[in-house]
Image (cartoon, grey):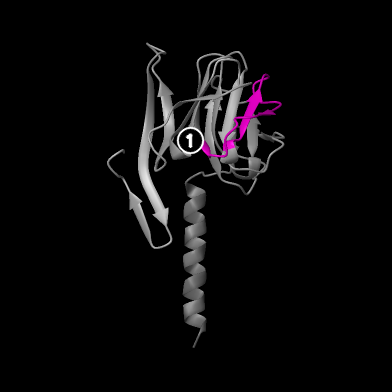
């Protein structure tokens, strides 16, 4: 009585597996981390760094054929990474975490942002001039390579900065995506007038 439904289920699962094989899908990352990857940055077509949850940093030097885990010395979630052509770079994440690399992501050192807000975006004009954005309206600027940070803009405690982009034609112009939101146990307000 149960043989026919089990046989049909087995045939269905086999068909799904065969269909997936015909699509030529293959796992590109030989070292799955089990953590979400939140952002990536590249210096060129073959050198890529990715950051993710639980301090995950991965790097490839061959366009993604092989990846290696890089020690980040943190367990916080990382949300953004930026690399310069000369090998300098910054990664940012929870609790105001800022990590710096001088060798294109091979080694990372922590910097103090002086903040506890989650940082969600990063951009660099040079190794010295850096902008970071994050929750609760945090927009930070460093002009000394991340040794010191100053808040350059604040809208209000309910408006967070999600990401940023520097105008390539005019580096004095900064575009920041901001979102007015509030979360309480009994309600969520999203997309307010400051968005």
Q: Which residues are magenta?
A: 96-119
Q: Is residue 174 above or below residue 186?
A: above
Indicate the quadrant where residue 155 lies. top left
Q: Residue, x 62% and y 17% (percent of image)?
A: 87
Toward the left, the furthest residue is 193
Q: Is residue 163 visible?
A: yes
Indicate the quadrant where residue 147 lies. top right
**Left or right side of 109 for 187:** left
Q: Residue, x 61% and y 17% (percent of image)?
A: 145
Q: Residue, x 54% and y 22% (percent of image)?
A: 45
Q: Residue, x 56% and y 43% (percent of image)?
A: 26
Percent of width and height locating residue 100: 64, 25
Q: Is residue 63 visible?
A: no
Q: Is residue 23 magenta?
A: no
Toward the top, the furthest residue is 169
**Left or right side of 148 for 122:** left
Q: How many marks?
A: 1
Percent of width and height locating residue 172: 40, 13
Q: Is residue 113 magenta?
A: yes
Circle 1 crowding by C-alpha within 10 Å: few under 14, some 14–19, many from 20: many
Q: Secondary structure at mark 1?
A: strand
**Left or right side of 168 for 37:** right
Secondary structure character of the magenta stretch overall: loop
> Foreground: 36 or 119?
119
Q: Is residue 61 above or below residue 27?
A: above
Percent of width and height locating residue 78: 58, 38
Percent of width and height locating residue 9: 49, 72
> Foreground: 183 or 57?
183
The C terminus lies in quadrant:
top left
Reading the image, the residue beneath label 1 is: 134
**Left or right side of 68 for 13:** left
């Amino acid at each position: 009585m149960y043989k026919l439904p089990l046989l049909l289920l087995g045939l269905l699962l086999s068909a799904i597996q065969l269909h997936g094989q015909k699509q030529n899908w293959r796992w590109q990352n030989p070292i799955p981390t089990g953590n979400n990857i939140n952002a990536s940055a590249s210096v060129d077509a073959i050198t890529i760094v990715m950051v993710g949850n639980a301090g995950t940093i991965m790097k490839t030097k061959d366009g993604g054929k092989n990846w290696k885990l890089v020690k980040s010395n943190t367990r916080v979630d990382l949300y953004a990474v930026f690399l310069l052509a000369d090998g300098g770079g910054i990664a940012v994440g929870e609790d105001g975490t800022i990590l710096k690399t001088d060798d294109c992501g091979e080694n990372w050192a922590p910097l103090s942002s002086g903040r506890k807000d989650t940082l969600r975006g990063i951009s660099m004009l040079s190794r010295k001039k850096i902008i970071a954005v994050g929750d609760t309206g945090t927009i930070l600027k460093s002009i000394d390579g991340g040794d010191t940070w100053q808040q350059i803009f604040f809208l209000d405690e309910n408006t967070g900065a999600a990401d940023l982009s520097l105008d390539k034609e005019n580096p004095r112009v900064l575009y920041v995506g901001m979102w007015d939101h509030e979360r309480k146990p009994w309600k969520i307000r999203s997309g307010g007038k400051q968005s």
